[in-house]
Amino acid sequence: MTSAPTSPRLDVRRAAARDTTNIGWLDSKHSFAFGHHYDPANTHHGLLMVNNDDTVTPGAGFETHPHRDMEIVTWVLQGSLVHQDSMGHAGVIYPGLAQRMSAGTGILHSEKNDSWRLDGVTGAHAEEHSDPVHFIQMWVVPDESGITPGYEQLEIDHELLAGGLVPVASGMPDHADHAAIRIKNKYASMHVARMQPGQAPITLPDAPFLHVFVARGEASLEGVGVLSEGDAVRITGAGGQQMTTETGAEVIVWEMHARIAG
């Protein structure tokens, strides 16, 4: 990992420019090179290697598959996603629930839209539904390899109601008492804002590397202008910009204080 260059840069990546994998049950849009969509000039920004915008049809999903030495954060926008892994963890991820899986020395897991919705946060009742599940899955490298695999999830829907940036997943020491879940990289933190029309602007973190992604709605970023759903901005050496919205937006911001070398 290395530090940031000194010259500020705002690199706008529009939603329509993303590579897409569409195989019927899965509609996946890739912000970075992924799978057979390989581009050596688009492998990462800062410490973020994957930002996949996935929609999975009811009754379908990712069968059991392996991961290793990666911090994987999943953020659901609509519907519910069932997670199971080889460490014995199982749960349902839904909007407002932060989830992290540390692949470490190796883990097998599956993620499926199994056409069932839990009633509230207790899961006491379930009812059949036919909704797609729409989620963003993000991968960052850990700051050390070979760790013990792990899993964590936490409900933070209430914290998001204020509309400001909420630390969702972080390994940064300064966020130890504030982030919903922990990731194994002390240089990275993920924030989410559910911005409401007419609210005060949010201010992006001051960091050498930022990745700003509009997951839903439309927002304006200082120095860039209007960003629509699926648009992203890769910011280098120039944090602190303000964001506003006239229509409402859900924005995911990765704050990173190092980058992958090379």
Image: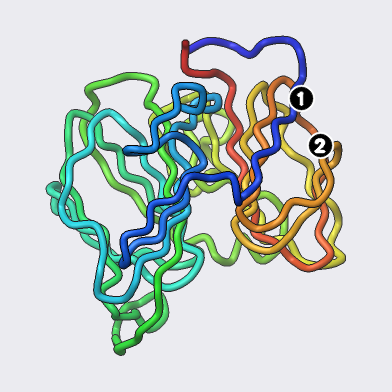
Residue 36 drawn at (x, y percent): 33, 37
List the residue tagged with mark 1. 238
Please give the label number shown on residue 17: none
Residue 2 drawn at (x, y percent): 53, 10
**In this picture, residue 141 sits left or right of residue 164:** left
Q: CA distance from mark 2 to mark 1?
A: 8 Å
Residue 243 drawn at (x, y percent): 80, 48
Count of all numbered marks drawn on residues in the image: 2
Q: Secondary structure at mark 2?
A: loop
Look at label 1 and name its amino acid.
Ala
- Crowd class of label 1 (few under 14; some 14 to 19; many from 20; radius 10 Å): some
List the residue tagged with mark 2. 241
**In this picture, residue 248 sits left or right of residue 48:** right
Look at label 2 and name its amino acid.
Gln
Residue 69 drawn at (x, y percent): 27, 28
**Residue 31 against residue 53 in the figure, above or below:** above
**Residue 203 against residue 46 in the figure, above or below:** below
Q: Secondary structure at mark 1?
A: loop
- Crowd class of label 2 (few under 14; some 14 to 19; many from 20; radius 10 Å): some
Q: Quadrant of residue 219?
A: bottom right
| Marks 2 and 1 in Cβ contact (< 8 Å) | yes
**Nearer to the camera, 231 or 167:** 231
- Which residue is at 47% across, 11% downward? 261
